[in-house]
């Protein structure tokens, strides 16, 4: 924006008022001849001045709204650093004029002139210049811009020829009062520059927050050949610190050494501050150690650097050194130490600093109290923070805001009450107060409360504030009011990357996450550059949407923005690829990360566990431990889930011991994973014992134990657990009813199952999912009620999925229902033609009826579709090693011993009256071949190996990837009695506990 200038228009004042324009030149014997026009060198300054009236010496400088688009320096010496919207900091508003009884106002200037006239005092030109310079220095020290303008006006009107000192005083007064445009114009009109004038100008910009311009001016000064002094160097270092230009700061450090200013205390402190704020704590410490003299500023600069790094240990160590050096401890030092304690969560050390503040008598200082509030807040001690706040005599808005923010962060409900007290005390809220209240409403998930705060925001005129707008957008998005969040976002005039991140936070649900690509593209079109937090949100959306294609495009942007090596972004990438079943890509990203923390390891382990690669999850966990990374509760829970999938009991027991050692047994996620692991490994007694030992139990834990009971065929305990859950006040969810319905299905309790299905909809208001319908179909199908199954499917409000028809097909195979089985298989061939179990089940149905031509047709169709049958296998764990067996297997190292054991068992079975059920061999072969086939099923090989390899009193646990056949089921019952061993078999459907000749399924499976 260009500057508007006014030309000087003067009317001839009366003789009696003429002295007001010439305050330092008596009318009796003037020592200076006043030209009719101002001096040539001062003429370019005239456009700054406008007189309001002919009888008033008050001069107003008409200034543009800073920064401008062009400084309009047209001569060859105009300075670099054009002011534009890219400044690093928005400048402060110009100081308001201060009261007339405190500053050298225009009346004082005029009164002084009158006194001189009455006394007949005459000043020569040097005295006059000194007087003007002194007045300008006084205005600069007090920040009195209007009075400084008045003095400047008198200089112009009186035609005074400025010397270098007066020129510098003019630059200094405008720079110190924040009128940077005028300071630069005065500087540009100087006949000669020197290091003092350069320093005054640079200091003005730096003090107003324009670090980048300060750096540019310093570079220009050096190009002009001016040698900096210690004040210039200090200002330049401060500018480098403000705009994070560490490389230039190091060059200034070289200048410091070159001019021999390193011994200067102020320069040394500025160097420490530069390196500390740049995160180069080693360099900051080296500079600090080499300083010949130290003061509180240098100590505080180093302490503040460690506080920003969150290195509470080093802060306390340095603070102890400071106290030993007998350096006076001020409130700023204590505040910095408290900041370090807050960032590192060192409550005990923070309390020690608090006691020191009490001893020094500065506990009630508002500045220090805010630091105490922050420390107690970040250490989770809201009550202690409230006590500190209560001791402040007259808290200002900063203290109120800090306390409200503390209560909001700790999830307390008193922040609304405190806000009411603040209003009652007459304290006007600021943007930080209102942002904290909005954030509290977001954390509480209370939309009504958030809307009431929004009304306050509009009432006090803060709706245009960027931080408040961002908080409102996030609040509406997190509480599900997406439309209102979008409206607030659209109304924001000054959006930043935080605003976009807040907007995108509302589109993580599956129903809305498809909006992410469009919004992200729009953000890029508007020129915003993503940061690591925004990339994290985008990648999580890709995970929810399973849109790995868009995720890869985002990955390309991450590489383009040089964030591929960032641990935070890398972890999000691994999670996205893992949840999209692209484990190979996830591993590539994982291996490229230089530093892998516990969160990164947890994500890759979880990825393996959730994609049925439990062996790799366990190996990855072992590798993590070898690299010295300590697992957290999420790592342990994920690895336990991996052990559940492959039923590796020994690994699970080792993890259990680690859980106990780490004190994580009380964590609900870990406890649920332990119960699930023991349940899926066949150790239901251990699962039950862990569950009962826990003091508190949430919905997830109750669901886990109910599903465990259901899988093990203990329907009575499953229903009892669901009733106990209600008695303890824990509300069931959809997973609870899946466990209950599954238990009813395994037990054949059809009416009980129907009753609970009705409770699901009518009492608890839970809409049945496809899993609930599958349980009902399975329940009716197991009982052979195919007419009811058909009616149920027709009445379903959901479209039948592959899981429904697969359940129907399994029931048809169980009961030999060919006609319904064919229809179910046809549906499956349409929905999932690549699923092998559909072909196998239909083929088995035909085989049971002896329809071998149809069997061959199904197998031909399967071959034409390039579908391969998953081979049946069983595995057993012996001495912490898993041994896998296929049907008719001959590859095991102990296969001869295994076959000998099988022959021995065969003779005992024959003696016990066992007769093989040939109908379970679904191949068109001779009876002898059928008998041989049954004899070498994978679960029998695993049993024989376990019998020759384990302690006779130990329970044998066998795991199978397919459903156990009817003949093997009968064999296991008989052998459990013959061998006097408990045999537990987990097939794809459920657990079978064979003991003393019976099975826990009661032959209903």
Image (cartoon, rainbow, N blue to C red):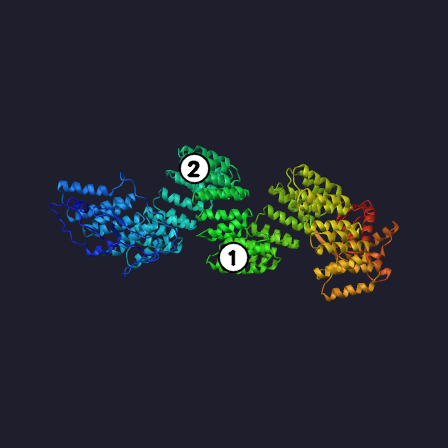
Residue at 45% from the left image edge and 40% from the top image edge: 401
Q: Quadrant of residue 934?
A: bottom right
Query: In whole angstroms, how far apart are the C-alphas of marks 2 and 1?
Result: 42 Å
Percent coordinates x, y for residue 847 in the rendering: 82, 60
Can residue 801 be seen from the camera position used here?
Answer: yes
Closer to the chain start, of discs 2 and 1, is 2
Percent position (x, y) of residue 514? Answer: 57, 56
Which residue does the numbered mark 1 point to in the structure image? 520
Q: Secondary structure at mark 2?
A: helix
Q: Nearer the viewer, residue 503 or 530?
A: 503
| 330 vs 67: above or below | above
In the rendered structure, find residue 369 and report the number of the disc placed on it.
Answer: 2
In the figure, is residue 658 to the left or right of 217?
right
- Above or below, 750 relative to 39: above
Q: Between residue 338 and residue 745, name the one nearer to us.
A: 745
Residue at x-position 80% and y-position 63%: 855
Q: Position of residue 293 (x, y in %)?
A: 34, 44
């Amino acid at each position: 924006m260009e500057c508007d200038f006014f030309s000087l228009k003067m009317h001839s004042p009366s003789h009696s008022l003429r002295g007001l324009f010439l305050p330092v030149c008596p009318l009796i014997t003037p020592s200076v001849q006043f030209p009719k026009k101002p001096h040539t060198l001062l003429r370019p300054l005239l456009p700054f001045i406008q007189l309001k009236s002919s009888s008033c010496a008050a001069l107003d400088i008409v200034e543009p709204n800073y920064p401008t688009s062009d400084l309009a320096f047209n001569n060859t010496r105009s300075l670099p650093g054009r002011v534009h919207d890219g400044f690093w900091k928005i400048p402060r508003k110009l100081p308001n004029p201060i009261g007339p009884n405190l500053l050298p106002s225009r009346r004082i200037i005029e009164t002084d002139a009158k006194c001189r006239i009455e006394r007949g005092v005459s000043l020569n030109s040097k005295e006059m210049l000194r007087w003007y310079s002194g007045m300008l220095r006084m205005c600069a020290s007090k920040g009195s811009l209007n009075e400084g303008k008045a003095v400047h006006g008198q200089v112009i009107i009186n035609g005074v020829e400025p010397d270098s000192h007066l020129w510098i005083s003019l630059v200094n007064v405008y720079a110190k009062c924040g009128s940077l445009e005028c300071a630069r114009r005065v500087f540009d009109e100087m006949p000669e520059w020197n290091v003092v004038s350069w320093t005054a100008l640079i200091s003005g910009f730096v003090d107003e927050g324009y670090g980048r311009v300060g750096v540019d001016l310093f570079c220009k000064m050096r190009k002009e050949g001016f040698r900096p002094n210690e004040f210039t160097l200090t200002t330049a270092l401060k500018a480098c610190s403000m705009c994070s230009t560490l490389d230039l700061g190091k060059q200034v450090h070289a200048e410091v050494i070159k001019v021999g200013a390193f011994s200067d205390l102020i320069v040394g402190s500025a160097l420490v501050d530069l390196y500390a704020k740049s995160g180069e704590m080693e360099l900051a410490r080296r500079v600090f150690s080499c300083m010949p003299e130290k003061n509180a500023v240098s100590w505080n600069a180093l302490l503040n650097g460690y506080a920003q790094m969150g290195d509470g240990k080093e802060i306390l160590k340095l603070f102890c050194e400071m106290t030993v050096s007998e350096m006076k401890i001020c409130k700023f030092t204590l505040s910095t130490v408290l900041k370090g304690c807050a960032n590192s969560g060192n409550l005990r050390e923070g309390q020690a600093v608090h006691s020191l503040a009490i001893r020094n008598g500065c506990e009630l200082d508002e500045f220090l109290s805010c630091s105490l509030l922050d420390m107690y807040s970040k250490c989770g001690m809201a009550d202690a923070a409230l006590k500190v706040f209560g001791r402040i005599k007259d808290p200002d808005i900063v203290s109120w805001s800090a306390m409200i923010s503390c209560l909001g962060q700790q999830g307390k409900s008193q922040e609304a009450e405190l806000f009411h007290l603040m209003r009652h005390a007459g304290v006007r809220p600021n943007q930080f107060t209102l942002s904290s209240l909005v954030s509290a409403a977001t954390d509480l998930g209370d939309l009504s409360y958030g809307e009431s705060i929004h009304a306050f925001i509009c009432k006090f005129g803060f709706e245009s504030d960027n931080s408040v707008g961002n908080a409102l957008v996030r609040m509406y998005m997190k509480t599900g009011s997406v439309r209102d969040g979008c409206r607030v976002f659209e109304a924001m005039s000054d959006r930043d990357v935080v605003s976009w991140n807040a907007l995108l936070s509302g589109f993580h649900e599956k129903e809305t996450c498809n909006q992410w690509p469009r919004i992200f593209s729009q953000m890029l079109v508007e020129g915003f550059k993503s940061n690591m937090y925004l990339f994290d949100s985008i990648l999580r959306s890709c995970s929810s949407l399973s849109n790995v294609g868009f995720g890869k495009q985002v990955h390309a942007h991450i590489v383009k923005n040089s964030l591929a090596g960032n641990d935070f972004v890398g972890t999000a990438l691994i999670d996205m690829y893992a949840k999209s079943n692209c484990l190979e890509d996830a591993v590539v990203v994982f291996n490229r990360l230089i530093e892998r923390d516990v969160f990164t390891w947890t994500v890759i382990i979880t990825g393996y566990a959730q994609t049925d690669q439990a062996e790799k999850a366990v190996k990855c966990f072992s590798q993590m431990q070898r690299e010295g990374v300590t697992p957290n509760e999420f790592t342990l829970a994920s690895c336990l889930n991996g052990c559940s999938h492959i039923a590796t009991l020994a690994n699970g027991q080792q993890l259990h011991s680690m859980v106990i050692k780490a004190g994580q047994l009380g964590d609900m996620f870990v406890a649920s994973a332990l119960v699930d692991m023991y349940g899926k490994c066949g150790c239901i007694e251990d699962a039950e014992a862990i569950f009962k030992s826990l003091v508190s139990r949430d919905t997830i834990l109750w669901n886990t134990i109910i599903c465990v009971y259901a899988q093990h065929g203990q329907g009575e305990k499953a229903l009892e657990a669901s009733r106990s859950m209600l008695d303890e006040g824990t509300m069931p969810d959809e997973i609870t009813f899946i466990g209950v319905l599954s238990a009813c299905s395994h037990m054949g309790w059809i009416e009980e199952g129907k009753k609970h299905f009705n409770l699901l909809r009518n009492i608890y208001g839970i809409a049945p999912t496809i899993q609930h319908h599958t349980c009902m179909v399975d329940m009716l199908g197991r009982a052979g009620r195919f007419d009811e199954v058909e009616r149920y499917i027709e009445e379903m409000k959901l479209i039948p999925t592959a899981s429904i028809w697969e359940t129907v097909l399994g029931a048809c195979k169980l009961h030999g229902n060919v006609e319904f089985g064919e229809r179910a298989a046809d549906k499956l061939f349409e929905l999932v033609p690549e699923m092998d179990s559909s072909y196998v089940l239909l083929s088995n149905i035909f085989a049971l009826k002896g329809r071998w031509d149809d069997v061959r047709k199904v197998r031909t169709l399967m071959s034409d579709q390039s579908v391969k049958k998953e081979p049946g296998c069983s595995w057993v764990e012996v001495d912490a090693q898993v041994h896998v067996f296929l049907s008719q297997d001959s590859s095991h190292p102990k296969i001869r011993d295994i076959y000998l054991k099988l022959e021995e068992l065969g003779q005992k079975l024959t003696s016990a009256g066992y007769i093989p059920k040939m109908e379970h061999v679904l191949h068109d072969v001779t009876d002898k071949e059928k008998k041989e086939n049954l004899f070498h099923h994978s679960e029998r090989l695993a049993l024989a190996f376990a019998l020759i390899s384990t302690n006779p009193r130990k329970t044998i646990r066998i795991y199978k990837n397919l459903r156990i056949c009817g003949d093997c089921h009968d064999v296991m019952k008989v052998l459990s009695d013959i061998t006097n061993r408990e045999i537990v078999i987990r097939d794809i459907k459920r657990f079978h506990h064979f003991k003393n000749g019976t099975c826990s399924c009661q032959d209903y499976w």
